[in-house]
Amino acid sequence: MKILLLGANGQVGHSFLKHGGLAERGELVAASRDGRLNDGGTGAIADLAAPDTLLALLERERPRLIVNAAAYTAVDRAEQEEALATQVNSASVGLLGRWAAQHDALLVHYSTDYVFDGTRTTPYPVDAATAPVSAYGRSKLAGEQALRESGAAYLNFRTAWVYAPHGHNFMRTMLRLGAEREELRVVADQHGAPTSAGLIVRATLAAVDRWLQADAAERQALVGTHHLVASEATTWHGFAVAIFERAAERGLLARKPRVIPISTAEFPTPARRPAWSVLDNAGFQAHFGYQLPSWKDGLRDVMSQLST
């Protein structure tokens, strides 16, 4: 089976390459915007902002499984670059979906909690009404709609608060600032489930395996959107506190900084964030037979990787 991984240098894409699970399941082609890979290797070129490069790669490689880990994720900058965000997160996703439909390929795609407005106080089910409050959220929702209309066999995994030992993410920012400062002020009124890229990779592979083993009727029941997030929830403040506790235990920080809780209003950003990003992941676990552990377990795993 030919497998195409898009966004191979991102948090999730790089984690797929480190894990090795896709390469174990077929002939893997890893692609990035310029063809260079973070590990120093060379991959294929696929820039979702330049659809011609994407179509050329699809026609050349003819994959049976496409894992789209590429996205425009600069949430604040998207307020000024909504057209670019929409091209990457929607128009190119529609192109992928139409190609997959025409060539009987499975398309795995990742979406976000930002498709919701964050006004709930209980976990969002998959079929909850969407109402994005940012340009980034609108672009990702448009991508979901394009995928749904493409006619492709697809698995759309909404995830949230993604972090990894590599790349740009909240955990790495906290570790850097925590080493520099004695006190940090962190938002305490936004709620979500920190989800490690490693968990996303392992859960995706379990879902793909379930798909490959399923008959036509079972596959039809699996097609669509699922919530792939860690279990339980916290706030950014709570996540920061846990990061510093685990880091200190592992000797990654000489001392724990004080973490002062603040409100969203005290930390204004160009783009609005959902105050409630907790997604109901029970459906994923039921459909694919894969347990999604607590975010605390994921943090321990990532800290263990950083300390070895």
Image: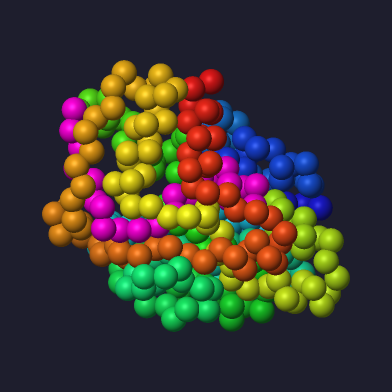
Q: Would you identify the image quadrant in which residue 121 lies?
A: bottom left
Question: How far across and how far down the image is residue 223, in percent?
Answer: 68, 73
Can residue 197 be found in the magenta stretch?
yes
Relative to the observer, which residue lies in front, 93 or 201?
201
The residue located at (66%, 79%) in the rendering is 151
Q: Residue furthest left?
A: 266
Q: Which residue: 35% across, 58% down?
A: 191
Residue 19 screen position, x and y as percent: 65, 37
Residue situated in front as seen by the camera: 84 or 184: 184
Please say whether residue 37 is visible from this viewpoint. yes
Q: How is the image coloured?
A: rainbow
What residue is at 63 percent from the left and 73 percent from the top?
224
99 with respect to 135 (left or right):
right
Give the residues drawn in magenta, as a range: 182-204
Residue 6 seen: no
Compared with 234, 249 (above or below) is above
Residue 11 counted in the magenta span: no
The vertical placement of 198 against 275, above or below, is: above
Query: Residue 109 location, x and y as percent?
Result: 58, 62
Residue 149, quarter of the rendered image:
bottom right
In the image, is 246 to the left or to the right of 228?
left
Q: Residue at 38% across / 36% down in the picture?
A: 243
Q: Position of residue 173 (x, y in %)?
A: 32, 37
